[in-house]
Image (tube, rainbow, N blue to C red):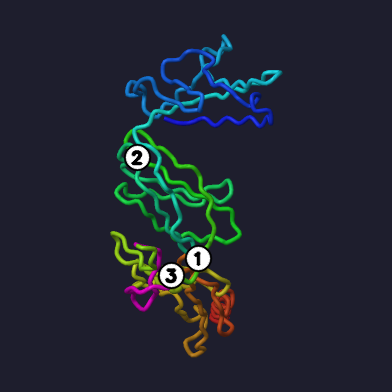
Amino acid sequence: MNTFQVYDNDPVIYNSERSLSFTEDQPLLTVHSDGTLNLKEELSSQIAFKPIKMQASSSLCRLRDVLAIDYGSPQLFNIANLTIVPVTVSQVQNLRVNVATEEYQIFEWDSPSYGHPEKYRLTIAKGESMHYEEELDGRRTVALTKVAISPSGNFTFKVSAVDANGETPSEWQRFTVFQNDLTCDGECSSGGVPLCYYGAFNRLEQFVDSRGAHCQCFHGFVGVGCDKTDNCQPEKTVDSYGGLDWREASANATVQVPCPYNTESDRQKVERSCEWNKSLGRAVWARQRELEKCKPQYYFKKLIFNFFNMNEA
């Protein structure tokens, strides 16, 4: 089932020998001198994913723990508390990083040795904070993420196997950026280049999944094959020279609208660009810019006021 590791660094050989035993008889486990733990009975009668702590009534201060004793003088000992969690799906195996660039990552793992996961949950942490999380089809054991990471960041990831009863997480595994500017053959539109990973026989090839052949998009292009352009959505802004209606625009495009309180003959306009924001991974409106001086709203009100005063006179 599992193994204990016990160390005694005493240089005297007979003093470094030790024995392992439970502090109380208990029905579920046996422990051997080499640290091996074995089940005495099946755990099918236990509630899945409910921890079983090897501890009796705390009011009696009696523990069902593993006791390690050496044969030195004085005789030393240590106690390890045990918690067993019966599961219906075990941890994923051989968790690994295929590619990790500053713009995308590909993670792989082998299926659990026990149980049938309905899905997997991939979690990426930056330091102590969760950075990214995604649920994945239980039939696949590879995941592509397009998360911006820096070479100097402290990033770790884990994959949890999930079934109807609960989930079993893997250990956290640290990773860093170790590949950039990979090139391989593949098919993409003019908006990108093939997104590469190490496939069969450790050969660089284009990453393909149920969504199709993936491409790494140039700024402003989106989609699996980079065949679409991202857009800035229609927006209304209000400034000292009045309200302006900005129509939808594609990334890297520039839009001009006339100043609202100038005459057509003035031909004065306000300009605004739809720019690609790399950190957000989408197109956003930049700040608007006057090509020439727009007349402010109060100027138009002043003209109306003067017009009425002239009529009254």
Q: Quadrant of residue 2?
A: top left
Residue that appears at 39% across and 74% down: 193
Q: Is residue 160 above or below residue 150?
A: above
Question: Callout 2: helix, strand or loop?
Answer: loop
Residue hosting label 2: 113
Q: Residue furthest top?
A: 60
Q: What's under tag 1, amino acid-wise?
A: Gln
> Could you tell me the amino acid type at mark 2?
Ser
Residue beneath label 3, please?
232
Residue 268 percent location from the top left of the image: 52, 85
Q: Residues within 10 Å of mark 2 (few under 14, many from 20)?
A: few
Secondary structure beneath disc 1? loop
Residue that badge 1 annotates: 179
Magenta highlight: main SS: loop
Whichever of callouts 2 and 3 sits on the residue coming sooner in the sequence is 2
Q: Using the numbered discs, state the Cα–Cα distance from disc 2 to disc 3 in whole angstroms.
A: 48 Å
- Label 1 Cα crowd, 10 Å radius (few <14 / some 14-19 / many 20+): some
Of callouts 2 and 1, the N-terminal one? 2
Is 8 on the left-hand or right-hand side of 202? right
Residue at 48% across, 22% down: 53
- Tell me the quadrant of the picture where the N terminus can be found: top left
